[in-house]
Image (spheres, rainbow, N blue to C red):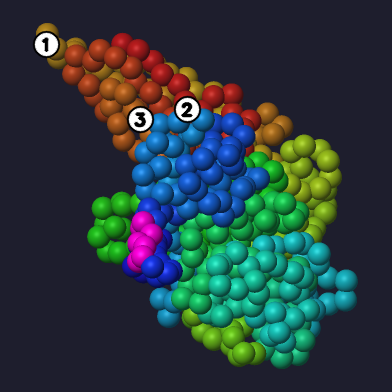
Amino acid sequence: MNKFFALFISMFLVLGLLTQPLMIVKAQPEKVSVIVGFRGKPDAGLIKAHGGKIKYQYNVISAVACSLPTTAVDALRKNPKVAYVELDGVVEAIGEVLPWGVDRIDADRVWDRDSNLVVDAGANIGYGIKVAVLDTGIDYDHPDLVDNVAGGVSLVNYTIDYMDDNGHGTHVAGIIAAVDNDVGIIGTAPGVWLYAVKVLDSGGSGYLSDVIAGIDWAVNNGMQLISMSLGTDTDYQSLHDACDNAYAAGVLLVAAAGNDASRLSVRFGIDTIDYPARYDSVIAVGAVDELDERAVWSSTGPELELSAPGVDINSTYLDDTYSLLSGTSMACPHVTGTAALVFGTNISEVAPSYDLDGDGIWDANEVRAWLQATAEDLGDPGKDDFYGYGLVDAAKAVGAEDVVTSKTMYVYSIEMSTETLYRGPNPWTKAIATITILDSDGSPVEGATVYGHWSGLTSGDVSGVTDANGQVVFESSLVKNAAGTFTFTVDDVVKEGYVYDPSKNNETSDSITV
């Protein structure tokens, strides 16, 4: 998809023919749309003093969106009260590269145990979980969505109606929560309350300022989830802060990874994950096909967290119709719907060891960690740049099928040593790292695959399997006349039936100096 960033530059030349004599009114200064971030509380007076007109004053970040004379931009950037001034960019819907998906992630096993395509009485359908869909709006009259669209807001500049005039947002909404009504399709979590936050226009594009306003609206209106099938190639500080602050406020954010992968980017390991999916505070979702293979266009990179169906997905569309679409835009709502189902479960029954704060209910961090732990591993063992932690699994995530949750494992110790081989006057030295993995009972974990890397005097990725003592030994490359530090870092630990919890590590990396 072609990405571009636009400025709204407007010039008004007013010629006034009044009476005699003819008078010419001076041209108004050129203006640009920007986002101004402040180091403290936003100062609306400062913006107005520089001839600016405020569009939004945000709560989720200390910033305002406004239009400013071009001559005022540099002056504001130099003001000690101002942290940054960013041009208001354009973000676009991620999709349209051109739904078996709900079945593939086993969402139907959560609310249809007898497989008759009817929601079981009393089943978990994510009822009442509030999801903000930041997109082109939602066709709230669609028969598969009319019962679940609970509200919304339009933040585009040409309408106050959050009705979809593109189709993309309606398609996303159907994947999340199309209802069981004997027609059309059933969504991943058919009891979710959908909120249409219209931040993209009829062409599928929208402004950064409107997206941030949408995140702001979601936080202020008590949303539990934000689904964003949109993205940009540009890292904006304002968008980054908005996502981080929303996540810190307890909202779980899910975004499409992007459709920007190519043979060259994959071959050379180029990170093609879009923003906001690339931020640590957001779950980045890639797309797979019916064979569980990554779609060739699905963006890759170390920030990729989960995968979901995203090829030829059938879902709701404009004017009471349905359409097949492909893209990570379609993968993202599968994860959003699954997260809503997890929010709708009892944490003490499904995953008591993940109740990190002991309050008996899920929070965004706990749901996110549980989605990672229950994902179906695809590609290389453990997390990778092509599938993340793997394919989201709704049935496992809500306890509709057995999951081993009683054991967690962690790095108990990393013991470092060196060995020097003398070959004439120039010695060769290598480092040795002995990793010990224990479970939650303090017992050695045999058969766990440990992934790590060397840095410092030598570099390289390594992996190995623990023995009966829970230990695995790694040796670095030999270094001639070594003088400096060898460092070993554990990146991941994987074993079927166990959950690796890095927060319990006694140490994740260790060094030795020679």
Residue 214, magenta (yes or no) = no
Image point (67%, 62%), residue name? 132
> Is 463 situated above or below 346?
above
Q: Distance from label 1 to label 3 (Cα)? A: 27 Å
Q: Few, some or many C-alpha atoms within 10 Å of disc 1 (few <14, some 14-19, many ≥20)?
A: few
Of badges 2 and 1, the one in the foreground is: 2
Q: Position of residue 513 (x, y in %)?
A: 35, 12
Give the quadrant of the C terminus.
top left
**Residue 206 appearing in the image:** yes
Image point (63%, 30%), residue name? 504
Image point (88%, 76%), residue name? 121
First of labels 1, 3 by sequence position: 1
First of labels 3, 2 by sequence position: 2
Q: Distance from label 2 to label 1 (Cα)? A: 62 Å
Q: Which residue is under mark 3? A: 454
Q: Which residue is under mark 1? A: 424
User: What amino acid does circle 1 point to?
Assistant: Gly
User: What amino acid does circle 2 point to?
Assistant: Pro
Residue 259's disc number: none
Secondary structure, mark 1, is loop
Asked if labels 1 and 2 touch by Cβ distance under 8 angstroms, the answer is: no
Q: Which residues are magenta?
A: 21-27
Left or right of 190 on screen, residue 333: left
Seen as rendered, the residue at the extreme top is: 425
First of labels 2, 1 by sequence position: 2
Q: Which residue is under mark 2? A: 80
Image point (71%, 91%), residue name? 183
**In front: 289, or 39?**
39
Give the quadrant of the N terminus.
bottom left
Q: Position of residue 81 (x, y in %)?
A: 51, 30
